[in-house]
Image (spheres, rainbow, N blue to C red):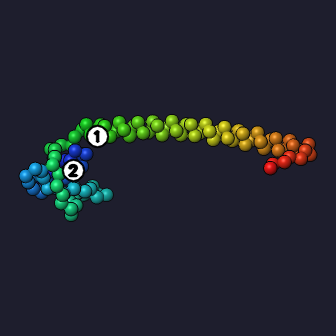
Amino acid sequence: MKKYLKDGRKVELVKEIEGGFLVQDVLTAYDDEQYLDDTIYFVDELYDSPPKEVYYIEIQKLLNEIEKLKETKEKLGKSVHNLRAKQLKLQNQIITASRQKIHINFS
């Protein structure tokens, strides 16, 4: 009988025992064919359908992480732009100095 764990994974109920259940993971192949994992393990909670709240919470965490990564990307992009502008300015100073035959000590 197919059941679900708190994290939303589908499992096959092998046997109900005192204090919980013995289950096997239901795995999905690339062609969407489902099969059972060989490992049987104990869980203390099972659900008839996947807990939606767990998915909602996980989705919210992922969306928050995406926003933080977008902010980091934007900051890094600005930093790269600023560094390129500084590099261009220094290159122009070197070109100007070399045209004026000014000796520059880089040490």
Residue farthest along the bottom direction in this orientation: 38
Q: Give me the residue at 57% from left, 40% from top.
A: 76
Q: Give me the residue at 41% from left, 36% from top.
A: 64
Work out how far the residue at label 2 is from the one at label 1, CA to CA, in angstroms. Answer: 13 Å
Q: Secondary structure at mark 2?
A: strand
Q: Give me the residue at 67% from left, 41% from top.
A: 83
Q: Position of residue 69 (x, y in %)?
A: 48, 40
Q: Are there few (<14), some (14-19), or many (20+) residues within 10 Å of tag 1? A: some
Q: Secondary structure at mark 1?
A: helix
Front in this rendered view, residue 47 or 19: 19
- Look at mark 2 in the image and give the residue it sits on: 10
Q: Is residue 85 above or below residue 33?
A: above
Which of the two labelled residues, at mark 2 and mark 1, occupies the earlier sequence position? 2
Q: In the rendered view, does 6 fall on the left or right side of 80? A: left
Q: In the rendered view, does 67 fall on the left or right side of 106? A: left
Q: Quadrant of residue 31?
A: bottom left
Q: Is residue 99 above or below residue 35?
A: above
Q: How many marks?
A: 2
- Look at mark 1 in the image and give the residue it sits on: 55
Residue farthest along the right direction in this orientation: 101
Q: Give me the residue at 12% from left, 57% from top.
A: 14
Q: In the rendered view, does 66 fall on the left or right side of 45? A: right
Q: Position of residue 54 (x, y in %)?
A: 26, 40
Q: Position of residue 94 (x, y in %)?
A: 82, 44
